[in-house]
Image (cartoon, grey):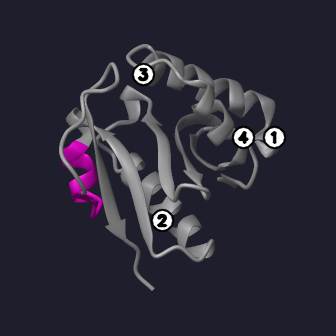
Amino acid sequence: RTYTRASDVPSEHGDQIRMLREQHLWSLEPPSADGEVAAARSVHVLAESAGKVVGGAQFDPETDRVRQVVVDPAFRRHGIGSRIVGEVGVVARDHGRHELAVHAWESSVPFYRRAGFEPDGPPRNDSPVPWRRMTARLGE
């Protein structure tokens, strides 16, 4: 499901995606104040299974970035992350964008390459988790 504002996400789904992010993202790299501001202005894409949120991501229309991509480990390797990132691409195109960026953790670079992203700069070590900027051209 896609929600155009953070405030549109039902509270139970918000709690579930927040828990996934706390366990699998924020435990490695805590969210910043800038990240909270970006989340508030972002479009949220959530994946559900049997009424439970099993993954999600955000599209920040101010920076043209996909952010906070996470999938419950029990549901990984089933294409859910790829579908989430694909849906973020649709949202970006709907916003008139032709390119999408991601600040990918180095361990996630192969996943983003499979999704059509290419490195756009060198690896960075200025946060707790090494990362690199990657971009993907969005089809018409």
Residue 118 within the segment the image draws in magenta: yes
Check contact, mark 3 vs mark 4: CB within 8 A.
no
Using the numbered discs, state the Cα–Cα distance from disc 3 to disc 4 in whole angstroms: 20 Å
Q: Which residues are magenta?
A: 109-119
Q: Position of residue 83 (x, y in %)?
A: 43, 56
Three-letter amino acid code at disc 1? Ser
Three-letter amino acid code at disc 3? His
Q: Is residue 7 above or below residue 99?
A: above
Q: Nearer the viewer, residue 36 or 116?
A: 36
The tag earlier along the polypeptide, 4 or 1, is 1
Picture disc at residue 24 = 3
Disc 2 designates what residue? 89
Disc 4 designates what residue? 40
| Other-residue count near label 2 (Cα within 10 Å), few / some / many at <14 / 14–19 / ≥20 | many
Using the numbered discs, state the Cα–Cα distance from disc 3 to disc 1 in whole angstroms: 23 Å
Q: Position of residue 13 (x, y in %)?
A: 70, 33
The tag earlier along the polypeptide, 4 or 2, is 4
- Locate the C terminus and report the quarter of the image it occupies: bottom left
Using the numbered discs, state the Cα–Cα distance from disc 2 to disc 3 in whole angstroms: 23 Å
